[in-house]
Image: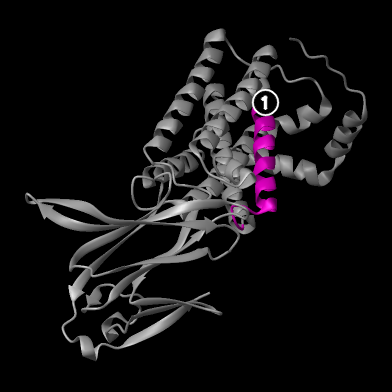
């Protein structure tokens, strides 16, 4: 497909005015002078902008910003790809902004993946899902360097597919108000359709050097689609948009008009910072309470399960045995998370942990604690804190 070129029309007049603007000329000279470090500057700019503007994962403005990033990133990829093969239409506006296209890719890619690192970090637990977080951080850091010496269209479109897929991973559950594997698959297929459609357009416009390069692009997207689904099934992807805001064990949890009153044993002065019953000094008649606050977007309702597990040494091999699975429903909308608790009586001393999972088995968090026999049960003192 051949582009028609013209220097007439309102865009030409706008481009001419821009070229005559002294501020624009000064910025272009500055950019050309420091072209070697420009990618790092734009990368840092994307990260800084996210840090200053992002609020919460279900905030309308935040999602509009990220959606605009995706659209503008796609536009920058098109400009960079067409400039690479010298097929950019001879439009004054495109010729004016074309030299900045690679830095645009750098800025918007950095902005998107830094936002994903923030969102997925809030949702990740220090278990298998941390692997995916490490990968996102790796992509974020690598983004600073991969466009310095060359422009790889297959790589750009592959990362664009990953950025789009990550966006739909949390955006679709927010819109629909539920979480499921079917929604995750739908996000992947939608990403494949959008980025695949863009690749086909670029092929029509002559951006690909060969049919083999186009095939490699679709192979890369297909491999990423399969890898993301495997990661989801293996619980390596944090359960965004959910995140555990707080979680610990206490001697008592009481619902009051002002919030949840959490009672814990007064810590020794050497551990003045401790604000929970860890380790748990147990006496006959005590119950162990586990309190958790889980953030969920407005209108999202999902099930959560507290898995109480005790460590046992069966045949000298440490294993975790589940003693109780206690479910409840989380309703979204609260900034500090939906508050809930479960408790267990007649507990035995030893090492314990509580896994907080969705009903689909995705890990939200894990809390370890030790139950020890109280040496002087009658001399224990307690204090409380309020979680609003």
Q: Nearer the viewer, residue 189 or 349?
A: 349
- Which structural element holds mark 1? helix
Classify 10 Å Cα crowding around label 1: few (below 14), some (14-19), many (20 and above).
many
* Magenta-drawn stretch contains 60: yes
The scheme the figure's colours follow is one colour
Residue at 28% from the left image edge and 72% from the top image edge: 278
Residue at 92% from the left image edge and 31% from the top image edge: 10
Residue at 16% from the left image edge and 83% from the top image edge: 375
In which quadrant is the N terminus drawn? top right
Pointer 1 residue: 78
Q: Position of residue 11 (x, y in %)?
A: 88, 30
Q: Nearer the viewer, residue 44 or 309?
A: 309
Magenta-colored segment: predominant secondary structure: helix
Q: Quadrant of residue 327?
A: bottom left
Q: Position of residue 142 (x, y in %)?
A: 47, 38
Q: Quadrant of residue 132?
A: top left
Furthest-bottom residue in this view: 379
Asked whether, in this view, residue 166 is left or right of residue 376, the answer is: right
Looking at the image, residue 168 lies above or below residue 289: above
Q: How many marks?
A: 1
Q: Position of residue 301 (x, y in %)?
A: 56, 52
The reply to whether residue 150 is visible in this rendering is no
Q: Nearer the viewer, residue 54 or 108?
A: 54
The reply to whether residue 308 is visible in this rendering is yes
Looking at the image, residue 228 lies above or below residue 133: above
* Magenta-drawn stretch contains 11: no
Q: Position of residue 53 (x, y in %)?
A: 64, 56
Region in magenta? 55-79
């Amino acid at each position: 497909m051949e582009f028609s070129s013209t220097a007439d029309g309102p865009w030409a007049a706008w481009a001419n005015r821009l070229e005559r603007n002294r501020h624009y000329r000064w910025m272009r000279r500055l950019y050309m002078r420091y072209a070697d470090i420009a990618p790092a500057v734009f990368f840092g700019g994307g990260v800084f902008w996210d840090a200053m503007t992002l609020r919460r994962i279900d905030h309308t403005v935040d999602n509009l910003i990220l959606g605009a990033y995706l659209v503008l990133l796609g536009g920058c990829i098109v400009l960079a790809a067409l400039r690479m093969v010298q097929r950019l239409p001879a439009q004054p506006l495109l010729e004016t902004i074309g030299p900045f296209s690679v830095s645009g890719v750098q800025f918007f890619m950095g902005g998107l993946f830094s936002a994903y690192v923030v969102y997925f970090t809030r949702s990740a637990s220090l278990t298998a899902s941390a692997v995916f977080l490490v990968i996102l951080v790796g992509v974020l850091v690598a983004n600073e360097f991969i466009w310095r010496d060359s422009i790889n269209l297959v790589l750009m479109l592959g990362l664009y597919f990953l950025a789009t897929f990550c966006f739909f991973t949390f955006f679709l559950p927010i819109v629909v108000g539920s979480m499921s594997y079917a929604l995750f698959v739908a996000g992947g297929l939608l990403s494949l359709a959008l980025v695949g459609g863009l690749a086909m357009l670029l092929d029509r416009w002559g951006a690909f050097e060969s049919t083999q390069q186009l095939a490699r692009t679709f192979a890369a997207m297909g491999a990423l689609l399969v890898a993301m689904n495997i990661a989801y099934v293996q619980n390596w992807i944090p359960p965004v948009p959910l995140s555990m805001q707080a979680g610990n064990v206490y001697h008592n949890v009481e619902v009051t008009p002002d919030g949840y009153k959490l009672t814990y044993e007064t810590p020794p002065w050497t551990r003045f910072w401790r604000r929970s019953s860890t380790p748990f000094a147990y006496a006959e008649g005590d119950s162990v309470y586990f309190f958790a606050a889980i953030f969920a977007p407005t209108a999202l309702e999902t099930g959560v399960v507290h898995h109480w597990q005790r460590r046992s040494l069966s045949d000298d091999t440490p294993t975790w045995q589940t003693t109780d699975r206690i479910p409840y429903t989380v309703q979204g909308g609260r900034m500090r998370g939906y508050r809930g608790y479960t408790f267990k009586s007649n507990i035995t001393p030893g090492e314990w942990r509580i896994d907080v999972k969705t009903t689909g088995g995705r890990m939200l968090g894990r809390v370890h604690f030790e139950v020890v026999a109280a040496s002087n049960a009658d001399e224990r003192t307690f204090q409380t804190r309020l979680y609003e």
